[in-house]
Image: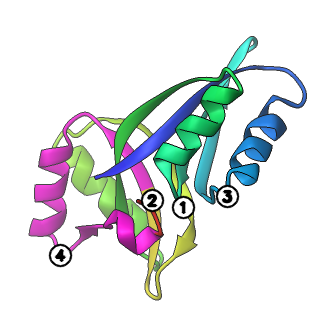
Amino acid sequence: MVQQLSVFLQNKSGKIAAVVRALSDSGVDIRALSIADTTDFGILRMLVSDISAAKAALAEQNCILSVNDVTVVAVPDTPGGLSRVLSLMAQEKIDIEYMYSLIDRGKEDAYMVFRVSDEKRLLKVLSENGLSAVRPDKLGLN
């Protein structure tokens, strides 16, 4: 399990830049990010090198944020690798709330971030099928 930082932003020019600058000024490295938006606001989801420092830096900027647990899965970096993982999840009726890719990758695997309905069942399915979740320390996260 990995902790993800979600920042709620107005959908206005410069808001993402301000968040990224605050993290940079605090020495926090962004390892992965995704943004979902609507007309009025967006949710910037990130995996960062130091969640505590990131929370402190963004609190100074009066950002509204939350921390959620997500699962980072090592997906075989071959044609059909992601399809296999998603098919296993569908067979087990594990709902995906959202997913996004991680910038970093292993030697033979790509990394995908998942927020799912049942993390325990996901971890069991991965293990039973020779797949694995990625530990936070392997991603440079603490």
What's the amino acid at mark 4? Gly
Residue that badge 3 annotates: 27
Q: Earlier in the sequence, mark 2 or mark 4?
A: 2
Nearer to the camera, 38 or 141: 141
Q: Secondary structure at mark 2?
A: strand
Q: Is residue 118 magenta?
A: yes
> Which residue matches tag 1?
102
First in sequence: mark 1 vs mark 3? 3
* Percent coordinates x, y for residue 83 in the rendering: 39, 61
Q: Nearer the viewer, residue 61 or 93?
A: 61
For mark 3, give the secondary structure: loop
For the C terminus, give its image quadrant.
bottom left
Point 23% across, 56% down: residue = 88
**Figure check: 51 above or below 79:** above
* Magenta stretch, residue numbers: 113-139
- Amino acid bearing label 3: Gly
Q: Residue furthest right?
A: 13
State the image coordinates of residue 108 (x, y, percent, origin top left): 43, 86
Q: Are marks 1 and 2 in contact (CB under 8 Å)?
A: yes
What is the spatial separation of the Cα atoms under label 3 and label 2, in whole angstroms?
A: 24 Å
Q: Which numbered disc, 1 or 4, marks the residue that appears first in the sequence?
A: 1
From the image, tell me which residue sits under label 4.
130
Precedes in sequence: disc 1 or disc 2: 1
**Which residue is located at x 42 percent, y 34 percent?**
67
Q: Is residue 80 visible in this depiction of the protein?
A: no
User: Residue 123 at x, y = what percent?
Assistant: 17, 56
Residue 23, given in percent of the width and then of the height, sits at 69, 47
